[in-house]
Image (tube, rainbow, N blue to C red):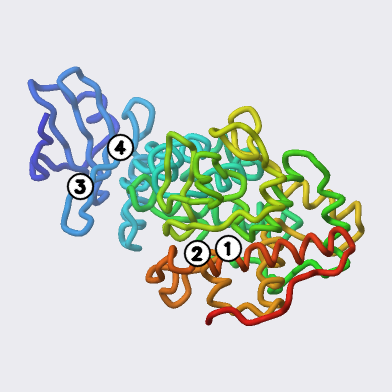
Amino acid sequence: MPRPKRAARKRQLTELYVRKVKPEKSAFLVWDGKQHGLALQVQPTGAKAWKAIYSFHGRPRWLHIGKASAISLSDARTLAAEVMLAVAKGKDPAAEKKAERGAGTFAELAARYVEEYAKSHNKSWQQGAHLVERHALPRWGKLQAATIARSDIKALMRQIAAPILANQVLAAVSAIFTWAVREEILLANPCKLVARNPVKSRERVLSESEVPKFWTAFGDSVQGRALKALLLLGQRPGEIAHWRREHIVDGWWEMPGKPVPELRWPGTKNGESHRVWVPRPVRSIIDSDETKGFVFGERGRPVPGLDAVMRTICKQLGVEPVRPHDLRRSHGTTLTGLGFGRDIMNRIQNHKEGGIASVYDRHGYAEEMQRVMEAVANKIMALVEGRPSNVVQMGARR
């Protein structure tokens, strides 16, 4: 039903008039002559309601104040005055109220973000969803998303003792609000201008004396074998966790750059297809007659809990914290320590520095990559077994 034009009727409203005014065949407005922007809307059914009507960016906006039977004329004028003051400050009260209704609870908004955006656009969506589920939903799950303020974000950050973890939670929550603003579900992201915790840059690698201690601590659990492979291969922890037997071809691990949903393969971090040689020690860890499925999976799922296992091991050994990614860094340090150049390290670890990963002929470097991967694995296993390494330090093609 089209709304009546603004110039319909205008008078100094009174409580008596509001009670006595009769309905007509179509809805109509009666503008208050005392409070600018306030109008009484009368429906053909006889229902009467207060409306605050204003212009925002040249377009008319209608804000429902409430039923005339429930809100007095004086209160309606007060509420309309507050609306007009907000408009004068550059706000759009009608849009804000609509956003509050449309966003629903934070739990509902977070679920929409995952289903409508994250799963198809963010390969690391599961990590973000886990952080939100563990830290944000217990506090905000039942709150209306539009009511969450910057002070709530800061309170959540203070509650999380680990600075890096708090920063990760902030990023995960901010991603939800940023999407909601872009989709016009919310008007603002309360995470904006919330400062991240300062953290020190860390370059943790295993020392030669630590390698055998960690190797023993890894044990033979599925997580332990995955961490051993991570140290020997130098690939990203997420790729190790999702490693598929279907991608092992003639001794090479061939990773599709793009996601393969039917195999639950998330794709590589930089979206580039990658090919790395699987050295002998790794083949002994993953030796199996199976040709399909996750190399280190459990019940048809990628291996979970690598970070948790590393934290437990570090506590047991009483050493400075080591993350799964530090095992990848340790592999790279071992590689360069043997005299091989950064170019071959970038190719092996699929770094995209200076366009290297996107232009080299991966098969053209096959012999060199195979030799380097075997040499690094031999060096690591020599440390594990307490024997001299038979690898001669030398420079590779640079």
Task: Say which residue label 3 marks.
Answer: 33
**Mark 1 — residue?**
370
For residue 64, the mark is: 4
Q: How many marks?
A: 4
Residue 274 on image: x %, y %: 47, 58
Whichever of callouts 3 and 4 sits on the residue coming sooner in the sequence is 3
Q: Which one is closest to the eye, mark 1 or mark 3? A: 1
First-in-chain label (1 vs 3): 3
Q: Which SS class for mark 2?
A: helix
Q: Between tags 3 and 4, which lies in front?
A: 4
**Kind of residue at badge 1:** Gln
Question: Residue 227: horizontal and vertical position, in percent?
Answer: 72, 50
How far apart are labels 2 and 3 at the CA level?
84 Å
C-alpha span from label 3 to label 4: 19 Å
**Mark number, residue 150:** none
Q: Secondary structure at mark 4?
A: strand
Q: Residue at x 86, y 69 (%)?
A: 388
Numbered disc 3: secondary structure: loop
Instruction: Judge depth for marks 4 and 1 and give the one in front.
Output: 1
Q: Label 2 amino acid?
A: Ala
Marks 4/1: CA–CA distance: 71 Å
Disc 3: CA contacts within 10 A as few (<14), some (14-19) or many (>=20):
some
- Secondary structure under badge 1? helix
Tag 1 near tag 3, CB within 8 Å: no
Among the 4 quarters of the image, the one containing residue 355: bottom left
Mark positioned earlier in the residue sequence (2 or 3)? 3
The residue identified by callout 2 is: 366
From this viewpoint, which residue is outermost toward the top?
45
Dots 1, 2 in contact, CB < 8 A:
yes
Q: Residues within 10 Å of mark 2 (few under 14, many from 20)?
A: some
